[in-house]
Amino acid sequence: MKHNYRIEGVTVLLRPVELQDAPFIVSLRNNAELNKYLHSGAQTVEEQTEWLTKYFERAGDFYFVIEDKKTSRAEGLISLYDVSLEE
C-alpha cells in the first residue's frame, strides 16, 4: 500500500519503499549470501518495479526500507502484510 509512515529510531529510519528502490531490492535478491533469507521474487529491476506498482494498490500491506540515519544508506527491508487498520 502506498503510505507515508516513517518510523525513526536512534540510528535507523524506516521509510516507505518507492519505485526507485527497485534496484536495491533486486541487488539483495541476487546476493547469494543474503537471498537465503528472502522470499524468492522479482529477479530484475523491471519485474521488481512491476511488483511494487501492484503492491502500491493493495490495502493493508506496508513495505519499508531500513535506512542508516547517519549515512542515508539503505540497509535492508521489512514488510507487514494484511494489517487491519481498525478505527
Image (cartoon, helix red, strand yellow):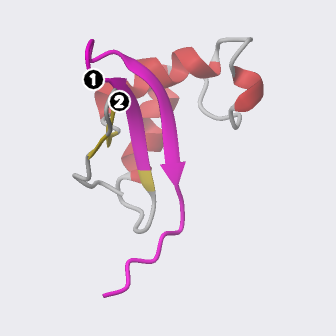
Dot 2 amino acid type: Val
- Specify the farthest residue to the left: 4
Assess disc 2: are there few (<14), some (14-19) or many (≥20) residues with their C-alpha within 10 Å of its C-alpha. some
- Percent coordinates x, y for residue 61 in the rendering: 45, 60
Assess disc 1: are there few (<14), some (14-19) or many (≥20) residues with their C-alpha within 10 Å of its C-alpha. some
| SS for callout 2 | strand
- Percent coordinates x, y for residue 87 in the rendering: 30, 88
Dot 1 amino acid type: Lys
| SS for callout 1 | loop
Q: Quick check: is 76 in the magenta stretch?
A: yes
> CB atoms at circles 2 and 1 under 8 Å apart?
yes
Mark 2 and mark 1: Cα distance apart in space: 5 Å
Q: Residue at x 43, y 18 (%)?
A: 23
- Residue at the disc numbered 1: 69
70 up-or-down from 6: above or below: above
Q: Say whether disc 2 or disc 1 marks the residue closer to the N-terminus.
A: 2
- Residue at the disc numbered 2: 12
Q: Quick check: is 66 in the magenta stretch?
A: yes
41 up-or-down from 20: above or below: below
Quadrant hosting residue 24: top left
Q: Residue at x 29, y 54 (%)?
A: 2
16 up-or-down from 87: above or below: above
Who is closer to the viewer here, 23 or 63?
A: 63
* Residue span colored magenta: 63-87
Q: Residue at x 26, y 46 (%)?
A: 6
66 up-or-down from 27: above or below: below
- In the image, which disc is placed on residue 4? none
